[in-house]
Amino acid sequence: MISNTPPSESNESENAAPEVSAPIARETPEPAETRSPMPFWLVIFSGVIIFWGGIYLALNSGGFRPDVYNPELVSWAGGGSAPAGPPDPKVVGKRLYTQNCVVCHQTTGLGVAGQFPPLVGSEWVVGGDWVGDNHLVKILLAGMQGPVQVQGVTYNNAMPPWAQLKDAEIASILTYIRSEWGNAAAPVTPEFVATIRAASLDRTEPWTQKDLKAIPAETMPAPGAAAPAAPAAAQPATEAPAA
Amino acid sequence: MNKTTLLFTGIFLTFGSAWVGLVAYPVANLGTMEPLLDEATGGLLPPPVSGLAVAGQRVYAANGCVECHSQQVRPDPLTTDIAKELGKRQTVARDLLRQKTAFPGTLRIGQDLSNIGARQADTNALHLHLYAPRSVTPWTNMPSYSYLYTVRKIQGQPSNESLVGLAGPHAPKPGYEVVPTEDAKALVAFMLSLNKSYPLPESPEPTAK
Amino acid sequence: MTTDPSSQPDTLNAAARAQIDASIGGPVLLFFGTAIFWLLFGSALEVLSAIKLVWPGLLDGISFLSYGRTTQAATASLAYGWATPAAIGIGLWLTARLCRVPLQHHKLLVSAGLIWNAGVMVGACSILAGNSTSLPLLGFPAYSTPILVLAYAFIAIWAIITFHQRKPGPLFVSQWFLVAGFLCFPWLFTTANALLVWNPVAAPAQAPVAFWFANGFFNLWLVPIGLAAAFYIIPKGIDRPINSHHLSLLGFWTLILFGAWTGTSQLIGGPLPAWLVSVGVVASVMMLIPAAAILVNLHLTLSGHYAPVGWSPALRFIVVGICSLATFWITSALMAFPSVNAATNFSDINRALLLLGHYGFFAMTAFGSIYYIVPRLTGKEWQCSTLIVWHFWLSAVGLLLGAGGLLLGGLIQGFALQEVIVTFRSSLEFARPFRVLAIVGSILTFAAALSFAALFAGILLAGRSRKSPALLAAREENSQEPVAV
């Protein structure tokens, strides 16, 4: 029976008051607390833990800096390790390759049989026959389509253009693939990429093997060569859209 | 100040201290992080990801992938995550900038996925693993996400999105193909975007010993 | 041992108690009844999830039954459908008793209970349908959590009114815990939802907030309510005062201070600045202080009077709950050391700890509290002693097999995950037998939930024919202990 009467402290039960059931009747008085002292060992225990906590925090917080994620790398003096000197293009190239190229050409550079051509030992990468350094850069800038022969095997797929990458990025990727997996060809410089990019601005369609074959091969100038315009001087023909 | 006010104020201040440290500070500091400029190439670190990958994060959350998979590479030498090639370096807060939700995870019933895009870059293989995990890895505990795929009659040519390599009981009937739904495509795009190969100054790669 | 003159005397005689209990009976029983429904639902999903972990081919390829969704739905329905309403029901009754005023505003609480359950229903179905947020203990999607916030607002309004109307006098330790719990839960819940679900902050900031919430949900909501019940029912059950006011103070304040900071100790080596992680590690180890204070306080209270734990269901469940809490905090402290954590993080130990905390402590304490409270609300006795005995042993053995098995298996699995030469496949094979044990444990806890549901139905439907309380065992003839439960 639910009563809405105001709280009552009287011992007699009102007419509207609910009956006292057996479970309530056998309850003991409401609980209280005594003021016994804390066991001494507990105080010592708490003190020891707090002391340990303070030391741990001092040693392992990396100076409370927001950019320190691994306190073992940073001394309490707060110095972090900062890379010095220009980054190795091969390292940068490997990173960019892993981000952009492994989807098709795989981390092993072996591609996927029947689908994506390998880069290992590929004449497109290290040069051979009629393939020059300029062809490789052009492929990266505009992409490739149609049947392509790599080491005697024909692939027919589409490679997207990567013109949105900067010259330095393309150069580092090419440097990487030309020196990895047993390939041994000269590193590609950003200046060379810039030259080829400037010379192929009119090409928006992905290249076919036939189109590229129509373009004479250019070798990159040796490091320390006089002018970046040297390749252009050696080649009389400009690119013409292939039939 | 009576006892009640003391109690309320005390709880407010003590609990509030943790709120300041674990909520207010991270939101103000980590929540306003910006990508860094990569001096070597002029690009952004971390690099932007495709819209499909961002959509895939919702699919990842919807299917509770975080219940089995973690997404944090812990540092060398404290742990062996790097030695086990789960990543090249520790995952840090900036790595999460391109995600809408953080999925650090608390269990490794399945593999850590921080760098799955670097380890397994083949779209078809990822789809196969989602559609019929035990056809790829017979000993795995992973459930099948075949409900994210459609089995349909081949119209003319097989679609270039259809799964290749299904065999045995998982293969569709002759004349049928298995194609991923938009959710499956988004999920795989998200997994491919999980690739922390770029460097960050606050997370140096451990030097070779 | 002097009695503290400021924390008694008993102004609450039996008639006043009866009036209070009668006024609050309806809403509290509503919360308990719906909580038991969700306990059954969540426990059943737990069994399914545990089986699917070892035999993934079972019911495979069905979207709403896939492991990720069922395990999240199980955790969410147990946390918000069973644990929170049980905590609310216990908290409401304790507030009314300790404030010594009968309940006003009945309808407010009943509405709150119904709205809350509607919210949980929407949330749990949403998770199974594929709308989970995948945040730890925060899986309900954005459209369902405002329903829960609304329901809680009603409860908060009631609690403030009742507290304001209370009889003047000092606050008993249970009241401190109740105030802490009722204050911290909405703070945790609304902040976490606002920052992670309704209008998410950038992902780099989300991990600390998410783990602050998940740990706070246990340490600052379930634990305070459970302890409030323990600190009330234990002294009443044995007719002795709580041993030490000072230990109560120490335990309370260190719980509130350190309990909220422990979250980041589960992110050692994770994408967080090192100092945030270190603070979490230190806080987890500091939790040994409230663990010791509470354990010692209650032990000294019970000391020499442990006999009733043998025959009183309420006392036995609560004592097991307190022991589980201490085990949970000690294990968490050990797991917080980075060198240990490197091996144990990401292993089944995390699952064991969730079980130990939410089931071992809170569910057991809630069972004990419900065993104490419901006869006083209905005026009837629990109907079947044998079934209570079954309930106890099924839940205790289920907890042992589940938490113990996963703890041991997790340790082995963790070391396998850490060893470079051991393959991932091997770690799965090491964990497998212990996961099978966990399946058995989950089946036993489900059976325990079934027996508890049967007992609850029994006491609601029974007449008043039974005169003596249902006990776990016969009380000795010459025992000095009162039968106060």
Image: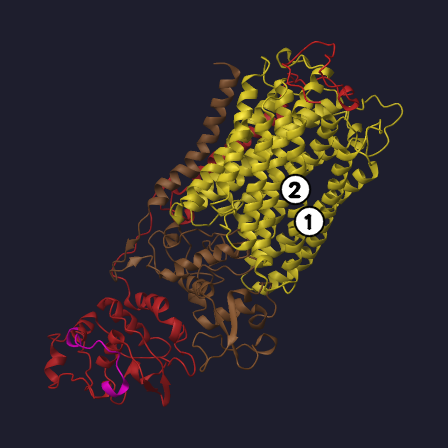
Chain colours: A red, B brown, C yellow
| Frontmost residue, C266 versus C111 | C111
Q: Is residue A165 above or below residue C186?
A: below
Write down the quadrant of residue C108 in the picture.
top right
Please give the range of residues in magenta.
A198-211
| Frontmost residue, B177 versus C229 | B177
* Mark 2, secondary structure of its residue: helix
Which residue does the image show at 35% across and 71% down from the upper left?
A101
Instruction: Point out which mark residue C359 bears.
Output: 2
Q: Please tell me which of labels 1 and 2 falls first in the chain.
A: 2
Label pair 1/2, CB-CB below 8 angstroms: yes
Identify the amino acid type marked 2: Tyr
* Mark 1, secondary structure of its residue: helix
Q: Quadrant of the C terminus of chain A?
A: bottom left
Pinpoint the chain carrying mark 2: C
- Magenta segment, principal secondary structure? loop
Q: Position of residue C338 (x, y in %)?
A: 51, 46
Q: Nearer the viewer, mark 1 or mark 2?
A: 2
Q: Residues within 10 Å of mark 2 (few under 14, many from 20)?
A: many
Instruction: Point out which mark residue C402 bears.
Output: 1
- Asked whether, in this view, residue B171 is left or right of residue B41, the answer is right
Identify the amino acid type marked 1: Gly
Q: Position of residue A123 (x, y in %)?
A: 31, 85
From mark 1 to mark 2, how far is it between C-alphas?
A: 10 Å
Q: Is residue C295 shown to the viewer in this render? A: no
Which residue does the image show at 38% across and 54% down from the upper left?
B95
Q: Position of residue B34 (x, y in %)?
A: 31, 49
